Image (cartoon, rainbow, N blue to C red):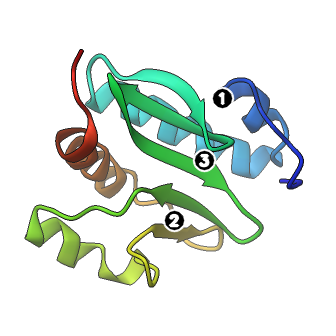
């Protein structure tokens, strides 16, 4: 995405992506909505995000991967399972050349909602 690109909603962000990447983004969006009841779509830091009172899940398309933020800190077993996808700061990176592990991403969304989300 261009650095000056400022989407107003998820769909604006998705439209700027290639069709293949758009499908991945839409799959993640649908998954989070299915797994985390009450999650609301929003845009934060220029990325599609979800909130439960507080933003708990960010995801974005980059040149070679889809990133998911913020870093997951618990549960330890899930954090360990994510080792292959974790960057130096703990953010998750899913390369385009590999299958998207949706089941795993769903568990990440649930854990991030528990870790960061706060109901109002």
Q: Are marks 3 and 1 in contact (CB under 8 Å)?
A: no
**What is the C-alpha distance between the residues marked 3 and 1?**
13 Å
The mark closer to the camera, 3 or 1, is 1
Q: Secondary structure at mark 1?
A: helix
Q: Residues within 10 Å of mark 1 (few under 14, many from 20)?
A: many
Q: Position of residue 52 (x, y in %)?
A: 31, 25
Q: Position of residue 118 (x, y in %)?
A: 22, 29
The quarter of the picture where the C terminus appears is top left
At horizontal 77% and vertical 32% (from top left) the residue drawn is 7
The mark nearer the N terminus, 1 or 2, is 1
Which residue does the numbered mark 2 point to in the structure image? 99
Which of the 4 image quadrants contains residue 91? Answer: bottom left
The mark closer to the camera, 1 or 2, is 1
At horizontal 65% and vertical 29% (from top left) the residue drawn is 10
Which residue does the numbered mark 1 point to in the structure image? 10
Q: Nearer the viewer, residue 28 or 43?
A: 43
Q: Nearer the viewer, residue 89 or 84?
A: 89
Q: Position of residue 108 (x, y in %)?
A: 29, 52
Which of the labelled discs sits on residue 24, or is there none?
A: 3
**16, above or below 83, in the image:** above
Left or right: 48 as drawn, with respect to 61: left
Q: Residues within 10 Å of mark 2 (few under 14, many from 20)?
A: few
Q: Secondary structure at mark 3?
A: helix
At horizontal 85% and vertical 41% (from top left) the residue drawn is 16
The mark nearer the N terminus, 3 or 1, is 1
């Amino acid at each position: 995405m261009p650095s000056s690109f400022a989407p107003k909603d998820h769909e604006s962000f998705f439209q700027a992506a290639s069709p293949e990447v758009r499908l991945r983004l839409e799959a993640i969006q649908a998954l989070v909505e299915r797994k985390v009841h009450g999650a609301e779509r929003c845009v934060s830091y220029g990325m599609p995000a979800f909130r439960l009172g507080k933003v708990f899940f960010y995801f974005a398309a980059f040149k070679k991967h889809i990133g998911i933020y913020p870093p997951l800190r618990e549960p330890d077993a899930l954090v360990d399972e994510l080792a292959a996808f974790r960057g130096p700061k703990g953010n998750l990176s899913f390369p385009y050349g590999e299958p998207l592990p949706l089941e795993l991403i769903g568990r990440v969304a649930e854990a991030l909602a528990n870790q960061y989300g706060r109901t109002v």
